[in-house]
Image (cartoon, grey):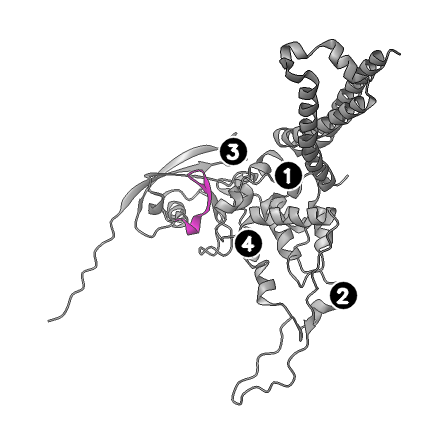
Amino acid sequence: MAVTKVVEKEKEVTITFRIQRYMPEKDEKPYFKEYKIPITRGMTILDAIAYIQERVDNTLSFRASCRMGICGSCGLLVNGIPRLACQTQVLQLNTTVVELRPLPNFPIVKDLIVDFTGFFEKHRSIKPYIIRPDVSDLSDLDKEYIQSPEEHLMYLQFSYCIKCGLCYSACPTTYTDELFLGPQALTQAYRYSADTRDNGIEERLLIVDNPHGCWRCHFAGACTMVCPRGVDPALAIQLLKKEIAARRFGAKPRRELAKLAPPPKEAKPRPNIPKPPPPSV
Amino acid sequence: MRESTLWLLHIITGLLLVLFFAVHLAEFSALVGGAGYEEGLTYTLLSERAQNILYTVFYIVFLATVTYHANYGLRVLLIEWLGGRWEKAINILLILLGLAAVLYGSYVTITFHLMSVGV
């Protein structure tokens, strides 16, 4: 007798989505529109807004890309808390009404889409790249830097940042001081400065040591609360302050710049292992 | 001036204030003795104390320290409250207010000293 597998249909729950709509050419100010849609277990906010756009209202605009928490495009204010739409399951919110708004502290482009220009400008201003005394180090592709696991751990968590802007939108200081660099840029200033391969700490400390830099942070910690990647920007900002204060008290940093290691010439590859493709860069 | 310099001064003045306030309370209670605040605090007593130039200098330094510490704190609040674009205006306003407070306070203290020594 054939075994018939009964697949039980997932229970559907109807959830009301209150979504902020705004079309700058048409609307004077943002307004809310409600959509009632069926939600099943496992559906994320991103699934829900995609559902609304495909089947209910195709004028709804939102930004998304990877739908797995890597690209940082789908940040939204979900029931008052900045979250990634793709990483938030609707039923886990435990409410029947979900309010979606664009991220605060950013200018709105349309509906749920915000303008990240200023945010990226601040990010660029802190020189978010490895600075070497000898630029040719960076183009020498045959060699690698020597860095111990301990040295790697000094900045590892800060390098998980995906620039989704959630910390920036949660920050009360960014809300009141529009020139404040923001937790994201300050964290990246620390991330590159703490990297032993980098020699740009003094340059970056001069950039963040201004009235709208790290001293404006009063440690609300909202950035750390909302980070979807487990980064602790509040910590990074305090560490930046510590670096500056140490220098003001005359303490000399005793960090050695990571050296370039020559490629292991003596090592012989085992037979029957195909050669890697030539470098494409 | 770099922000860290201002911040460092804020911390240093904060520590100094603890010391100055302790000195102020200690010499004050030594001055009035067991008489208590109401009876002990007389014009003659204060006038006698003001004859010592060290007290005059101490209170002017105390005033300058308090003014800097308070104004830096106020500046942080105002920049947050009004927004970063007002920073220059806030700086100028607070420097003027601070200078006015220190100058007026010094004028009073020095005049009292001169009156006490009978110039």
In the rendered structure, does residue A208 fall within the stretch colored magenta? Answer: no
The residue where tag 2 is placed is: A134
Marks 3 and 1, the one that precedes in the sequence: 3
Badge 2: residue crowd in 10 Å (few <14, some 14–19, many ≥20): few
Most distant residue in the bottom direction:
A271
User: Residues at marks 4 and 3, common chain?
Assistant: yes
- Tell me where residue B45 appears, x and y as whole percent: 74, 13
Q: For the point 56% across and 46% down, which residue is it?
A: A234
Task: Relative to A261, say whether B38 is above or below.
Answer: above
The picture places residue A88, in percent across and down from the top left corner, at 40, 49
Q: Is residue B72 visible in this depiction of the protein?
A: no
The residue that mark 1 highlights is A216
Chain to which the residue tagged by mark 4 belongs: A
From this view, report whether residue A237 is shown above or below residue A155.
above
Q: CA distance from mark 3 to mark 1?
A: 38 Å
**The disc label shown at residue A161, or none:** 4
Distance (Cα) linking label 1 and label 4 = 21 Å
Mark sitting earlier along the chain (4/3): 3
The amino acid beneath tag 4 is: Cys
- The region drawn magenta spans A77-88
Secondary structure of the residue carrying numbered label 4: loop
The disc, 1 or 2, on the residue closer to the chain's N-terminal end is: 2
Q: In this figure, which residue is indicated by the disc labeled 3? A: A26
Q: Residues within 10 Å of mark 3 (few under 14, many from 20)?
A: few
Amino acid type, mark 1: Arg
> What kind of element bears circle 2?
loop
Q: Earlier in the sequence, mark 2 or mark 3?
A: 3
**Marks 3, 1: nearer the viewer:** 1
Q: Residue furthest right?
A: B119
